[in-house]
Amino acid sequence: MSILINIGRRGLGKSTLARYSAHAKSPRIFIDPRAQWRGSRIYRREQAEDMLEDLEAGRDFIVQPSEKQPTVDAMASVAALWFSEEVLPEPTTENPEPKGTRELSIVLDEAGTYDLDSWDWFLRTCDPKRTVIILTAHRPQDIDTAVRAIADTWCIFRTTQTHDLKAIEDRTSELVVREVQRLDPFEFVEWDDANARMTVHKNPAAWREPRNVRLEGKIIEPVRERKLWE
């Protein structure tokens, strides 16, 4: 997994699911503009040296910015530095091009409340084997089309508004649209964009607490040719 987008109204579980998904890679950065999350390491502004020290020690941290957009912008540089400053082993005959081993999970909570221009390069070039990026928003339209176009996975909670359903259908399928309208609270549809495959998750207890376990659900095989966002 690499880039995931969680869509849902307030109180349906999208941020809780984001925390669960972030458990796949560590350390973790949580950008929390509404100051809802709790943790021992909380920053109000970008402090690159201290943040990189936390990541080096394997410590997760939460960013609850006092100045939202400037701090969100600066955090893209921190994430890039984490990978670029990794010291790789010397090349050998057996391993002439050693690869980095650092990993990172990033949650961009309430991503519809700030722009992600500063994150564009990182989102497009991050290694999906070593990086998990989760964005949460209330509606599909809250996420810029440039980001939506490169998302790998969509996790969609109960949705009934006509404009939102149209946006979902443009990217997924009529079957997904029908299913998301029938969901109960805390249930969601997972759309694997690469394989055009839908999985329905109806057991919220499975992801209430973070665990490094792949969620299981009812898989629906590819249902149509994919479309790009219009």
Image: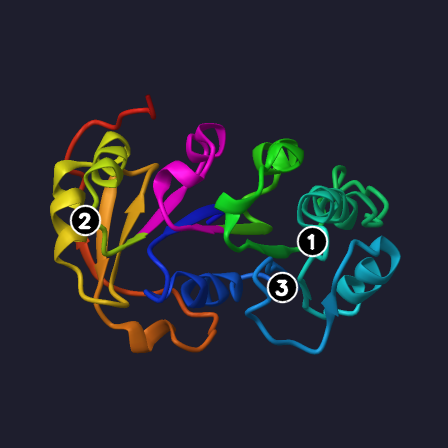
What residue span does the magenta drawing correspond to?
A: 135-155
Q: Of label 2 and label 1, which has the lower sequence position?
A: 1
**Placement of 102 over or under 152, stated as above or below:** below
Looking at the rendered image, the disc whose residue lies closer to the viewer, 1 or 3, is: 3
- Which label belongs to residue 26? 3
Locate residue 120, reporting x and y percent: 61, 32
- Kindly identify the residue that appears in the image at 60 percent across and 66 percent down: 35
- In the rendered structure, the answer to whether residue 112 lies left or right of residue 114 reads left
Residue type at tag 1: Thr
> Is residue 136 a member of the stretch shown in magenta?
yes
Q: CA separation, marks 3 and 2?
A: 35 Å
Judged left or right of residue 105, residue 5 is left
The numbered dot on residue 78 is none
Identify residue for label 1.
101
Name the quadrant containing residue 51: bottom right
Q: Is residue 36 above or below residue 85?
A: below
Q: Position of residue 130 (x, y in %)?
A: 60, 50
Q: Quadrant of the C terminus?
A: top left
Q: How is the image coloured?
A: rainbow
Q: Residue at x 79, y 45 (%)?
A: 81
